[in-house]
Amino acid sequence: MSYYAALLLFFTGVGVVVFLGYFVLKIKKERALKKLLATPFKKQWRIYLQKTPHYNKLPLEDRKKIEHSIVMFTYMKEFMGVGIEVTEEMKVIIAFYACLLLLHKRTSNCYDNLKTIIIYPSAVAFENLQAVGGIYTKEKFLIDGQAANDTVVIIWHDAKKEAYHLRHNNVIVHEFAHEIDFMDGEIDGVPPIERSKYDEWTRILFHDYKKLNALVLKNREWGKYKLLGAYAATNEAEFFAVVTERFFETPHHLKKHFPELYNELKSFYNIDTLQLVNE
């Protein structure tokens, strides 16, 4: 046998072994998940969910659907604690709000690209190094959460309070709105939407974004835009994440002051949040 033939045979063998190993692991994982899904939803998990202002208002069919999604989410994603031990409560509550956003969206799983959720006990300080005209400066800033394509950072101190009480803000909803925004490859305030709805979406959302941005820059009387807050004026992506928070946390106020905005979000998420919360 020639050297090249032997080399080809060797790499072919390695490829077969790798493929078989992957195939076996996939089968084992699918069997484990199937067994997990066949197990009754944990009573303690449901107790956590019943403490939220949203779960109990869901129709029975939706509650069953989201419980299924929670099991999938907690099994498929890696949860990492930094300075804190990850508990089942953390996993279930984060999974609930993440999957609530996609409850009526046509997706195979909740956030296919997402791999890791990193949980910190309290706000995290990061340093940002900037260079202007050859002068380097360090700037410290606190984050309440963060999202990238495959990783979400959650600050549990804030997330827990916001999960169990309507507080205008919800860091879990906010960060997973960013994940949804990125599903089309860009974080730009335009999540994956039908082409026929694109123009209407951008007209309504970006009109209100530009109006809010102008008010913040000029520091004028905000009027109804006070509901959205200054952070929503950061950029189009943050505007989408913030209005998603308002849609799920204070839908009656959003509907009253921004009816077109509310209707766009209702159409996108395919859920009427007015039926889920009592403000």
Image: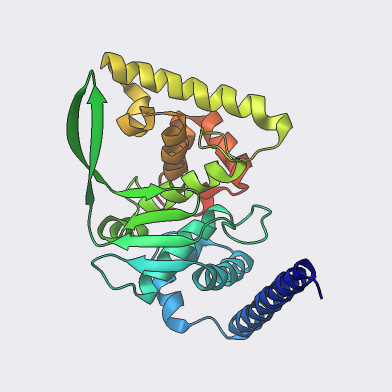
Q: Specify the color scheme.
A: rainbow
| Image side of residue 212 versus residue 9, left or right | left
Q: How many marks?
A: 0
Q: Is residue 180 visible?
A: yes
Quadrant housing residue 209: top left
Q: Residue 115, how many percent across, how many down?
A: 50, 61
Q: Nearer the viewer, residue 129 or 165?
A: 129
| Residue 86 % position (x, y) | 33, 72
Q: Residue furthest front?
A: 2
Residue beneath the point at 45% across and 61% down: 116
Depth check: give the residue in front, 275 or 166. Answer: 166
Nearer to me, 168 or 195 = 195
Occupied quadrant, residue 140? top left
- Name the spot of residue 83 as percent of width and height, x first: 23, 66
Q: Is residue 11 above or below residue 42?
A: above
Q: Quadrant of the N terminus?
A: bottom right
Residue in view at x 64 percent, y 26 percent: 200
